[in-house]
Image (tube, rainbow, N blue to C red):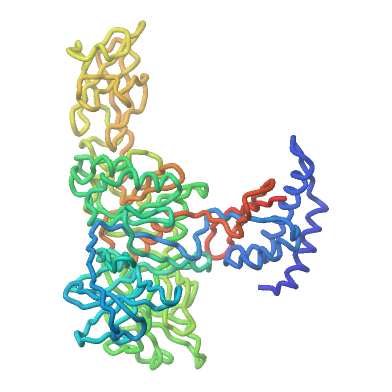
Amino acid sequence: MHSIEGLFAATIIFFYAIQLFQGMSVEKIDWVDASSKQEMQEFLIAAKNSDLADMVFYGDFSNFIYVTRHFLGESRGYSLKIDNLPKHIFEVGMLTETIVTVEATINSSDCLVPTGHSCYESTFKGIDYVLADDDSEVPDKEKYNMMYFDFDSSGTYEASEGPFVETNVLFIGGAYWSIGNIHNNSGNVSFWDAESLAHTKQHVRDFRINERQTNISIRGTLFSENLLVFDAIIIPAEITDITAYESTISAYVTQGGGVVRLKNITAQADINNAEKNIFAISWVNYDVRGIGSEGILTNVSASERIYAAGKYFISSGISVDTVSTNTAGYFTENIPNNDTAHIGHVSLGKNEYAVLVTNTSSSPVYNSFRIDLDQNSNFTDEVAGAVGDSIIIDSNNYDVGYIIETGLDITLRPNRSHEFRGVMEPYGSVYPESKSEKNIFVKSKTKKYNVTERNIDALVETATAACTAGEATMPPGEHLCGTFSAGVNYKFSITNASTIYDTINVDFNGDDIYNDDGEGPYKNGAHIVFGPETYRVVMDSNGALVSWRLYDRWSVPYGTVNYLGEGIAIWMPDNQVSDDEWSLFEAALVASGKSSFEFAKGAAHGVWAVSSSVFFANKETYMPYGVTLKMWY
């Protein structure tokens, strides 16, 4: 990046060049406001086409404000809002219901800890612990903010046994627990169940989108806490019923938060009203036609928020730790510098592959890789590759996005047509209520829901007869009734309001009432959705026959998306096993969360002028993001 002085010079030239060509549009706004907006727009255009864009992209906000004030004036206040770009620190809360609060006893004597004075002491899961005060707060006023555990049962607390603070995750009594709250006044400590938290933290990594680092921070939290401090939340599978928290979750999502629900759904009872309302998923008692279990990221436009999930998945990639130099058991003869090669393993689909990273010359920079694709423990029969190369693994294409110079890490980036093999099998009975493509996160490529054994375009003719119930809820006119089978039997009625039968109502809920929500009336030729199948209905003018033509079936979804207010809620099954699947989960998590933030926010006074522009991170992956500059004067 240029020095600030050089950037000033380059931006000044660009800034005044822009002024020669920019006009000013004033529509019922005062001159000062129009002038300010014009000046700000010119500045944003200059920023987008100079290194100022990199300052925003890489988070160099202090220098950006420094340059902004130089061009737009020291006396003004500024706020810069970024849209559709994940934060550098992405805060995630994992919800839990299991809380254990332990009472402590005060001990006024020296607690024998490396730091601290008076303390509380107690036992959790058979392990003695003490609370200590590091005296970093007001002197002589105890504030217990750290813990030591006597893990070796020695009766003393060594430096290696603490200090631990709130949100730390510890393995105690054969399970993982998080230090939830240290209650300073009473000395009590609340421990939260952290099994899912620990498991997730082991697999979710920080990642780079267009070479920009995003650090994912995950900690335990409760439904009673302020969820709005998080960019996204995770509801793990052990929380089996979210009914009591429906209003809390809905409020969080509608205000711009994101939620990822991990839950295996294998029976209709697994989807209660709360799950249905938040995630907009339904259960169908139908089989699934087709062979194969591949899934792809749904292709949506860049204007849709879920579009980011595919970009994050491609860009975050799958990171392979190649920290070991022990290649024993693998054949590496005649590979250049094999004595300094690094080796690691990556899980893709159902298989695990060994990865070898080497430096091709005497240079200390590692720049070459080999993957044991045939899994014969022999790297010499594999072709060497470099950054930017493509490689086919399990019929999927991956690009090598990055090899760290020290050889300790290599990143594989799936290409856009990536398929998720083997992840669909148990979930053929869940489907999203919306037919919009943007409401499917990952869908099956070959499987289709099947209500009946009919083929697409199959025509079924249904005879009608006099109606026996429900006529009071039908449209005015003459009525005939029939029954149509689409997995289950549905009663329907057709109506002649004048000279021909041209409207239809379907009793979807089987209550002999034909005017409930979604039951009609539908016009002749309408498309009517029965669960995951859609039929086109055509009525004979005399009402004797109704023709139903099947023309569409839902693909099987692996993950679904529901838009609620300003946020989104994603459902995914809880079966992440391979690095590939964990990368998909990570992409869903970041795509669901808040993607707008402000910095250098000014005081709430004065008159605001606002100017917006779309920036383009033209790096490895196309990912547009918006920049809005606010200024008060």
* Residue 244 falls left or right of residue 140: left
Name the residue located 46 percent from the left edge and 51 percent from the top edge: 307
Front residue of 54/372: it is 54
Residue 452 visible in this rendered orientation of the protein:
yes
Quarter of image, res 11:
bottom right
Question: Which x, y percent locates residue 389?
Answer: 47, 72
Q: Residue at x 77, y 39 (%)?
A: 30
**Where's residue 509, x and y in %?**
22, 27
Name of the residue lying farthest toward the top: 499
Residue at 43% from the left image edge and 47% from the top image edge: 567
Residue sitting at the far right = 20
Residue 76 placement, left or right of 263: right
Residue nearest the observer in this picture, 499 or 131: 131
* Closer to us: 435 or 108: 108
Does 499 appear above or below 351?
above
**Residue 358 located left or right of residue 395:** right
Residue lying at 22% horizontally and 74% vertically, measured from the top left:
122
Quarter of the image where the N terminus is located: bottom right
- Please identify the quarter of the rendering in which residue 370 is found: bottom left
Residue 334 in the image: above or below residue 468: below
